[in-house]
Amino acid sequence: MWLRSRDGFVLGGHVTPANHSDVKELPRLLQDVPLPLGGVVFADKGYSSRANREQLVRNGFCGGIMCRAHRGLPLSRVERRVNRLISSVRAKVERAFGTFKRTYHLCRARYLGQDKVELEFHLLAMAFNLKKCWGMVK
């Protein structure tokens, strides 16, 4: 599952089967989501690969993918600072994930079939956004 978020609101997303790695979803994400050219795409360390970074450049986006340390090669001070800046922006999206898992019990799929799980996700995203709006109005 991935989310597109602005100011903490969920603007889109899709669901993948459990046997499919989300890391391979970056090309579909870039096609499906109407992002402005030159915009920054933020992602966690799981997306840290040469292929994903090249995919961002080919599509005209700036990379906001966190750096990952490799065995015997720790992150430099600059890479740690970059990761901290990226994680501060990503925190809003991660809060949405936490709410989906904790409040809406989306840790496991309730239904069989990707279409049903995707519908459940979109309904929960609408509920999340409405609850967030209500909190802002108060």
Image (cartoon, grey):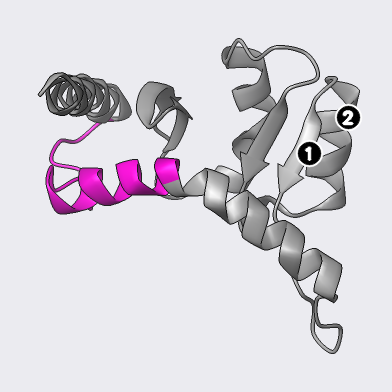
- For marks 1 and 2, the one nearer the N-term is 2
Image quadrant assignment for residue 74: bottom right
Residue at left offset 71%, top offset 48% = 65
Q: Quadrant of the C terminus?
A: top left
Give amino acid for label 1: Gly
Counting labels gives 2
Mark 1 lies on a secondary structure that is: strand
Q: Which residue is mark 2?
A: 57
Splitting the image into 4 quarters, where does residue 104 fall?
A: top left
Q: Residue visible at 68% across and 33% down?
A: 41
Q: What SS does tag 2 mark?
A: helix
The residue at the point 68 percent across, 60 percent down is 83
Are discs 1 and 2 less than 8 Å apart at CB? Answer: yes
**Closer to us: 115 or 36:** 36
Q: Residues within 10 Å of mark 1 (few under 14, many from 20)?
A: some
Q: Give coordinates of residue 47: x percent, y percent.
A: 67, 50
